[in-house]
Amino acid sequence: METDTTGTCFLSYKRECHEQAAKLVEALRDHGIPVWQDINDLAAGVTETEIRQVLEAPNTASAIMLVSPEVKNSDMIREVEAPGIFKRFNDKNGFFVVLVAAEGVDYSDMADILGPRTGITAVSGVNSLKTVGAVEQSFATEVAQTVLKNRLREILKALPSSVPIKIQVCTRALVNEPGIALCVDLRHRFDNRLAKENAWEDFIKPAIANLVEQLQQSPRRPVELSGKLSIPAATALGVAFLSIAGLKAGWLNDNASTGKAPEHWGLYIPKTASGFITDIEPQSTSADDYALLISVNGDVMDDFRHSSKSLSLRAIVHVKPEYRDDTGVELTAGAATDIALMAVDALRRAKQQYGKRGTVHLFMAVPVALAFMVGQQLNTFGEVQTYEYLAEAKEHPYVPAAKLQPSG
């Protein structure tokens, strides 16, 4: 049986360690690893048969075993999970294991804790990580990075060289589709449309950066992104996948609202005339910052005026349809390239004309694919402030979201 290397990661742990397991699950989701966990994926009254079925399923791609002292008292782990996991590992069909020693467990203790049906030889042949105490978030991130590295290795072995690595990123609804190599599920980092406090700096941006770093180990492999996510998140992804990063990254744009098939968008698509123009409007001569407005899905100007009263701006750069009634038009891939290039070019011209190098504030009503393409070109800008649109906040509909450092 060949392993579906894009499948889920089985998490083995003792229920008393559920808080540590939760930290592992969050870090794994940040790094694109879909997780199978009993409390989420099985009904009450877990049976041995159900566990065996999951471990034997081809779409169970890997396993993490949280080895704490309590595991020695678990017949389910010692007699069912551990033997099933190591049988899959020993079959050498793409399935891998990561052992996590915690709460004082040493590497030399793991074979005894996991039981005689596993064996010291099997335990010594797998990836192992250790933390002195309980699993904390920083260590959970280290575990997730190790799993990501191993997962990409196995996926690249199984995937034909011409096939792109498919990555789904979501801050909203998750779309379960086969063949997704990495599913960066960030919903736990958000309250509705806004990221939780410190989530961008502590979790989201570092995880995305590590993901790109791992992908750069195979720079000739194209990357196809998709997903339902916020404009700030799409822009942050674009900054991580800067056009100078050496990766051919594009977005599979969802055309479901138009009834058409999804379409590949990316800066590698030749531009075609979009019918959009740029307007650069000077502001305060004593200010350093710039605002970039892009009006595709709707005209952002009125909402921008309500939301930007506290900003000190040197200039406003507005990318908009040449004819006002064209706002909300359906874009082609080539037109999207035209708008993305046009927007950043106008921003650079404003920066050159006025000589100031302050923060760039992004206000965009665009498809997420276009936000991604704009982000990919911001490598010459020091600091970029993104904004999330909240329709219910009528007085200040745009609220600050991720702050990015493309050239940092």
Image (spheres, grey):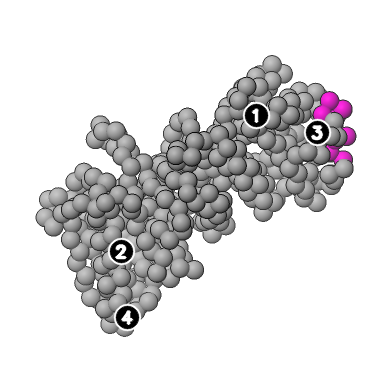
Amino acid identity at mark 1: Asn
- Residue 343 screen position, x and y as percent: 27, 62
Q: Nearer the viewer, mark 3 or mark 1?
A: 1
Amino acid identity at mark 4: Gly
Q: SS of the residue at dot 4?
A: loop
Query: Is residue 5 shown above or below 165?
Result: above
- Which residue range is magenta in the image? 109-118
Q: Distance between the residues labelled 4 and 2?
A: 16 Å
Q: Quadrant of the N terminus?
A: top right
In the image, residue 112 lies in the stretch drawn in magenta? yes
The residue shown at (45%, 31%) is: 177
* Of the image marks 2 and 1, the number of the one nearer the N terminus: 1
The residue labelled by disc 2 is 344
The residue shown at (45%, 53%) is: 247
Foreground pick, 336 / 190: 336
Q: Distance between the residues labelled 1 and 4?
A: 58 Å
Amino acid identity at mark 2: Val
